[in-house]
Amino acid sequence: RISYVNGRYVAHRNASVHIEDRGYQFADGVYEVCEIARGFIVDMTRHLDRLDRSLSELSIDWPMHRSALIVVLREVVRRNRVRNGLVYLQVTRGVAPRDHPFPAGTRPSLVVTAKKIDPEALRHKAEAGVNVITVPENRWDRVDIKTVGLLPNVLAKQKAKESGAYEAWFVDPDGAVKEGASTNAWIVTNEGILVTRPADHGILRGITRATLFNVAARLGLRIEERAFTVEEALSAREAFLSSATTLATPIVAIDGHPVANGHPGSVALSLRQAFFEIAEKSPA
Ligand code: PLP
């Protein structure tokens, strides 16, 4: 495997950054994960637009011109011969002696990695459906910024894993579902309406979520952006999650209780099926 680190393509096992990188010391950085499908980078424009927003919210400079970054993304995908998988990019404020305020004159660090994922394994997971658990929301109030500060997400995901679930939903004290540790949350009401929480500061503006709005429009499905509770999800026709890795994946149980009849929902699976036709495909 080959990865990109601050201007160099290096063997993945030797790819490293300095111990005083602020990403390492302060989680002072942001990231993106794009799906690679059939040799295309999916929704690259939206991912780079979100990167731009994350960087500007934290006053971190772009590590290079956008068009140069696209060249690096393609090069890492090409050098690793990834036709299906993910490309990961991370930008931190850079390397400086440890001190909380922004250092002067530091250049942002850029790391890009790519890995293959078997699309069949993901398809099987989606066709079987996944379990989720719920955990109290304990993250900060700007989770719309895609920072590498993911400790609550790590702990929630570990708890899910220990419970035999794939994902953990963060739930507000009033019972409203925010999103998963690495996915957005959706239900399909008994009237067939898609419901997902508005993209305010309380959830990540998922790129897959945004593209699913386009897919739903194409399929003639209505979407309501509003909060929903765990109880509502349990009595809904379907529940599902979305991310660049999972696309739309049905949820069959929440905290051990079946969603509807406990079978993967057909609306989620048809959204998944139509996804690649609608999403932007940039040659990798
Ligand atoms: N919510 C959180 C907290 C995430 O970390 C992610 C992706 O990593 C998502 C939602 C889904 O976003 P996307 O569709 O852009 O992958």
Image (cartoon, helix red, strand yellow):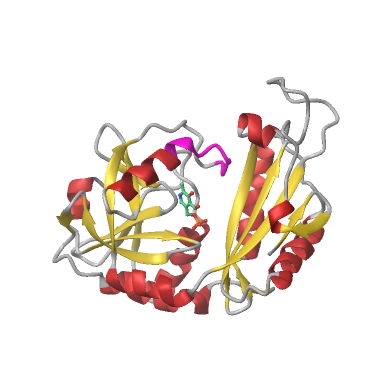
For the stretch drawn in magenta, what is the main secondary structure?
loop
Residue displayed at 59% across by 72% down: 280
Visible in this render: residue 257? yes
Above or below, 247 relative to 8:
below
Left or right for 170, reference 2: left
Across and down, in percent, residue 19 comes to 72, 33
Across and down, in percent, residue 212 comes to 44, 65
Across and down, in percent, residue 111 comes to 71, 50
Q: Nearer the viewer, residue 46 or 37?
A: 37
Above or below, 134 relative to 25:
below
Residue displayed at 82% across by 33% down: 106
What is the magenta range? Answer: 145-153
Q: Quadrant of the N terminus?
A: bottom right
Residue 148 lies in the magenta stretch: yes
Visible in this render: residue 220? no
Left or right for 60, reference 261: right
Across and down, in percent, residue 282 comes to 67, 73
Q: Quadrant of the C terminus?
A: bottom right
Residue furthest to the right: 105
Left or right for 22, reference 196: right
Residue 132 lies in the magenta stretch: no
